[in-house]
Image (tube, helix red, strand yellow):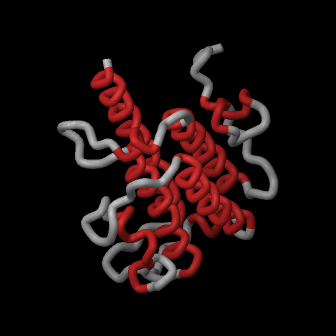
Amino acid sequence: MWMAGRSPYAGGIVSDPDRLYRILPQPPFTPQIGALVEMMNYARSTTLQAVHDLSVNELDAVPPGFSNSIGMLLAHVAATDRLYQTASFEGVDPYETEAYAPFVGAMSFGKDGERVQGRTLEELLAQLAEVREETLRQFAARDDAWLQEVMTAWDDFRPNQHWAWFHVMEDEVSHRGQIRVIRNALRAARG
């Protein structure tokens, strides 16, 4: 197998590990939304693989030369998903809602609100799963034409829905790369 021994299937996103390497939209999603979901599932599975056995100390550590911890990056991934849920599905600026307040610290990497520290991997993964479950529930209620609709949550930023959810996925992939680099730095420091 192409990534023998390194399969992101460990994350448990799908029941068949080979499905991670095929973009095959499945019900209840329409074809384009389904393809987006497949890509988001793969991105999430690689994130889960990258953090699968980290301790609270490893999640909170910020190695020299880095600005964030792995725990902060995981919380930021959840905050990004939640931000676009509010903007996309509710059509409002998340920063103008009380429901988004718990995510502000993670979204801003601690510049606004609290930094993420002391949370277990299980807590962080539960938050990721809970937020994503709502995204998927909302996706299942929409069709492919919805992807082309322009978002109205912000006056000065008007992406369409497709770009917004592509961005959620690529933001996770970017931070997953940072997570891998930080993890390697932590392991190298331990010797």
**What residue appears at the point 19 percent right and 37 percent down from the top-left corner?**
64
Is there any visible trace of residue 175 in the rendered image? no
Left or right for 107, reference 7: left
* Residue 56 in view: yes
Q: Quadrant of residue 118?
A: bottom left
Residue 19 screen position, x and y as percent: 73, 33
* Rendered residue at 47%/84% (across/down): 98
For this rendering, which residue is in front, 54 or 44? 54
On the image, the x and y values in percent for residue 84 come to 49, 68
| Above/below status of 145 relative to 51 | below
Instruction: Please tell me which residue lies in front, 82 or 21.
Output: 82
**Image quadrant occupied by the C terminus:** top left
Report whether 129 appears left or right of 15: left
Toward the viewer: 144 or 120? 120
Rendered position, 178 above or below 108: above
> Residue 182's x, y, as percent?
33, 35
Q: In which image quadrant can residue 59 be found?
A: top left
Q: Nearer the viewer, residue 65 or 19?
A: 65
Q: Residue at x 40, y 42 (%)?
A: 57
- How many labels, in total? 0
Q: Tell me the residue at 25%/66% (across/down).
A: 111
> Quarter of the image containing the N terminus?
top right
Q: Outermost residue toward the left?
A: 65
Place of residue 136 in the rendered image (x, y in percent of width and height, measured from the top left): 68, 60
**Figure check: 75 above or below 58:** below
Q: Quick one: which residue is furthest to the right in this view?
A: 27
